[in-house]
Image (tube, rainbow, N blue to C red):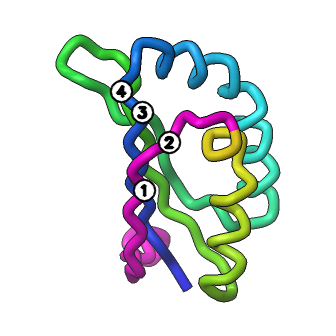
Amino acid sequence: MQYVITAFDFTDSEALSRRLENREAHLAGVKKMIAEGTFLSGGAILDAEGRMIGSSAHVEFDDREALDHWIANDPYTVGKVWCDIDIREIKLVPVDQFK
């Protein structure tokens, strides 16, 4: 099943610092997910000044339980970076068929 995750960061004065402290570990996990085929695309959501204020990701998991496990254990969740997480099931256009 495919999902789109939209996760906005906490807005306190230390939020960006926590994001930067956890970013390397988060990206290491994304790299592993890419190799496994579960991370399809994503990146940081930016504010008008170009500061990172959240994340968006397209992911694919066998079931919702696996997705919830990833989110619960991601460094951005554990490190109190993400505060408002929206999860929607989606069906992505298979872009390879249009090449």
Question: Gap between marks 1 and 2, in whole Å?
Answer: 7 Å
Secondary structure, mark 2, is strand
Horizontal and vertical percent position of residue 9: 42, 35
Amino acid of disc 4: Thr
Secondary structure, mark 3, is loop
Labelled disc at residue 11: 4
Dot placed on the residue nearer the N-terminal end, 3 or 1: 3
Q: Which quarter shows the N terminus?
A: bottom right
Q: Which residue is mark 1?
A: 85
Horizontal and vertical percent position of residue 99: 42, 66
Q: Residue at x 40, y 24 (%)?
A: 52
Q: Nearer the viewer, residue 2 or 99?
A: 2
Near mark 4 (Cα within 10 A), the count class, few <14, some 14-19 or many ≥20, is few
Secondary structure, mark 4, is loop
Secondary structure, mark 1, is strand
Dot placed on the residue nearer the N-terminal end, 1 or 4: 4
Q: Are marks 2 and 3 in contact (CB under 8 Å)?
A: yes
Question: Gap between marks 3 and 1, in whole Å?
Answer: 11 Å
**Residue 11 is drawn in which quadrant?**
top left
Question: Gap between marks 2 and 3, in whole Å?
Answer: 6 Å
Labelled disc at residue 10: 3
Q: Are marks 4 and 3 in contact (CB under 8 Å)?
A: yes
Q: Residue at x 62, y 40 (%)?
A: 76
Q: Residue at x 69, y 86 (%)?
A: 62
Q: Are marks 1 and 2 in contact (CB under 8 Å)?
A: yes
Near mark 1 (Cα within 10 A), the count class, few <14, some 14-19 or many ≥20, is some
Q: Which residue is mark 2?
A: 82
Amino acid of disc 2: Trp
Look at discs 1 and 4 and give the one toward the viewer. Answer: 4
